[in-house]
Every structure is written in structure tokens, then in C-alpha cells.
């Protein structure tokens, strides 16, 4: 990927907490530092829509009737993204595409991934204690107007933030790709957490881990022990907390718990996370399988 100058920003939305349930993909091509063209693809996830997700992005089952599934979308976007640099904000998008590829047996996308959230953390120190490195907070700080949770709009904002980082850091796209880029959704071996918060499972994450800055909480019955889950999350950079709060960014729910929540009582952590999401807090509800895929 030598002499890279252009890139494609990407964002996805999902129908429910299963990352494979992609219902929208936004692609924005940046050329010579400007938006060249933009595309939104509505996708039939062949899955149920959770009201929480509908409340976030506004996409309903009726909107995707007759739309292509990811089995049809992957070959098309795969050809378009061949050897491209893909900028995305946080690991959720690349993980969702990997999970969808596994679901349909299509194989991953042949491109180099570059997380603008990691780039932002290395470019600006001040946001960790001033709203965090979420897309909305960074866009607000830099005067970027966009419609949050519209896939193409989120992709455009991520691309503009990445360009801002290039401008302020003096580090080129190629240099960022050489430092942070990777060829697949697999991440490098996680590092051991160096510090711990007081609490049963709470601990600080590795400050240079790929998920550094995320604040994660676990709920429900997991296939691995809660201790192991906390250790792996911390090694990947997450600050592990014992309770859901406004500072939480990820709630991991056991796969079985998620599949049984309809018609049954959700855990108090799950309910609190949904209440905070409804109030505008950017918390991702993730099932255990997707959490494992995300941290590698």
C-alpha cells in the first residue's frame, strides 16, 4: 500500500446487538483531501430489528424489504475496496463486517484498515477527560456538522476527523497506515494490563491497546469466566468497570442472555444501558461472540 493518498471512510449500522446484522453501510471516498463521492447501501440483515437500534439509526424492517443481503453486497464492495485504505471510527465497523462475512461465508474485505479513533488518541491528548474520543464529541470540537448514526454521514465525519489529524500531527496517511494499519480484522496479541481499579473485576486497560479509552462492563452468563473476560478486555486497552454509568461505552452481554431477552426480564445493567442510550449516551451493546472477535 505504498504512496497512499486517497482513502475510503466507512461506517455500518446494525439491526440489533449482533454485529452480523448489518442493515446499512456508508462509504465516502476522499480524494486529495476532499470528499469525492458518497454512497449509502441499505441491507436486508435477515434478522430481527431491536427497538433500541431503530431508535438510534431510524432504519426499520420496512426500509430494507427487497434490499440485498450481505451475501450480495460483499462481492460488490469487495471489488471496489481492493487494496484501498479504509478509515473507520472504532473497531465496531470492521468487526461487524468480519462477522457478516463469517455468517455468509464470503471472506473478508481485501483492504487495509485504519481506525480514526486510534489516530485521534495519538494526535490529541485533551479529549480523554473532556468528553472522550467518540465521533460526536470530536466532530463537535472541530465544527463538523453531520447527522449522527446515518452511516454515510458518520463515515464522512470520521474521514474529516482523520484529515484534521493528518493536518495537525504532520503524519501522512501512509505513515499512519504503517503504524496502525492492519490487513484483516485480527488484532495483535493483547498486552497485559499494568494497573487496576479497586473492585471485583474493575481494572485499567493497557493505554496503548487497540481499544484504549473504551470503558466496558459485562453482564449475563458468559462462555468464559468474568475474570478472564475482564483481563482480556483490559489487555486490549479497555477500562473495565463493575457497573454501568454515563461513562460506559461498551456493555457485553452473554450470547444466550441476548437471545432470551425478548419477553423476559433483562439484567439491571442491560436495562440501565438502554435507558442511557435513549438519553443520547453512546453505549454499544455487544454480545460475547462479537466482543471476542473484536479483541482478537
Image (cartoon, rainbow, N blue to C red):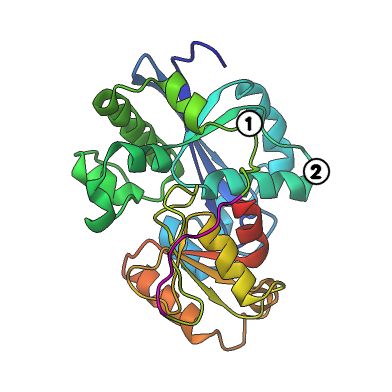
Magenta-drawn segment: 190-198
- The residue indicated by pointer 2 is 105
Q: Taking 82 as reference, is 158 left or right?
A: left
Q: Residue 280: within the magenta?
A: no
Where is residue 256? Give x, y as percent: 70, 76
Indicate the quadrant containing the N terminus: top left, top right, bottom left or bottom right: top right
Where is residue 177? Give x, y as percent: 49, 26
Residue sitting at x 46%, y 55%: 206
- The residue indicated by pointer 1 is 183
Measure how far apart labels 1 and 2 are at the Cα level: 18 Å
In the picture, residue 74 is in which quadrant? top right
Residue sitting at x 42%, y 41%: 118
**Camera-side residue: 115 or 154?**
115
Residue sitting at x 30%, y 36%: 123
> Please, is residue 55 above or below residue 270 in the view?
above
In the picture, residue 243 is in which quadrant? bottom left
State whether the magenta stretch is mostly helix, strand or loop. Answer: loop
> Please, is residue 103 above or below residue 250 in the view?
above
**Camera-side residue: 58 or 159?**
159
Dot 2 alpha-carbon crowd within 10 angstroms: few under 14, some 14 to 19, many 20 or more: few
Amino acid at each position: 500500500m505504498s504512496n497512499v493518498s486517497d482513502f475510503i471512510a466507512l461506517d455500518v449500522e446494525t439491526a440489533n446487538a449482533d454485529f452480523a446484522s448489518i442493515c446499512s453501510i456508508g462509504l465516502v471516498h476522499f480524494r486529495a483531501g476532499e470528499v469525492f463521492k458518497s454512497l449509502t447501501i441499505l441491507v436486508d440483515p435477515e434478522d430481527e430489528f431491536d427497538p433500541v437500534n431503530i431508535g438510534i439509526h431510524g432504519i426499520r424492517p420496512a426500509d430494507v424489504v427487497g434490499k440485498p443481503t450481505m451475501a450480495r453486497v460483499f462481492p460488490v464492495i469487495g471489488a471496489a475496496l481492493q487494496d484501498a485504505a479504509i478509515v473507520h471510527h472504532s473497531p465496531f465497523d470492521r468487526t461487524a463486517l468480519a462477522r457478516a462475512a463469517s455468517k455468509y461465508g464470503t471472506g473478508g474485505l481485501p483492504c487495509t484498515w485504519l481506525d480514526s479513533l486510534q489516530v485521534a488518541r495519538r494526535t490529541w491528548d485533551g479529549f480523554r477527560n473532556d468528553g472522550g474520543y467518540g465521533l460526536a464529541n470530536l466532530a463537535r470540537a472541530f465544527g463538523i456538522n453531520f447527522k449522527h448514526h446515518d452511516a454515510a454521514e458518520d463515515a464522512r465525519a470520521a474521514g474529516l476527523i482523520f484529515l484534521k489529524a493528518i493536518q495537525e500531527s504532520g503524519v501522512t496517511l501512509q505513515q499512519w497506515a504503517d503504524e496502525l494499519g492492519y490487513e484483516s480484522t485480527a488484532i495483535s496479541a493483547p498486552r497485559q494490563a499494568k494497573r487496576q481499579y479497586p473492585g471485583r473485576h474493575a481494572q485499567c486497560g493497557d493505554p496503548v491497546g487497540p481499544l484504549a479509552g473504551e470503558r466496558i462492563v459485562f453482564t449475563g452468563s458468559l462462555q468464559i469466566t468474568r475474570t478472564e473476560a475482564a483481563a482480556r478486555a483490559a489487555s486490549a486497552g479497555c477500562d473495565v468497570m463493575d457497573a454501568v454509568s454515563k461513562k460506559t461505552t461498551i456493555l457485553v452481554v452473554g450470547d444466550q442472555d441476548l437471545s432470551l431477552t425478548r419477553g423476559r426480564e433483562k439484567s439491571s445493567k442491560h436495562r440501565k444501558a438502554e435507558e442511557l442510550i435513549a438519553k443520547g449516551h453512546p453505549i454499544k451493546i455487544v454480545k460475547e461472540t462479537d466482543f471476542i472477535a473484536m479483541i482478537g
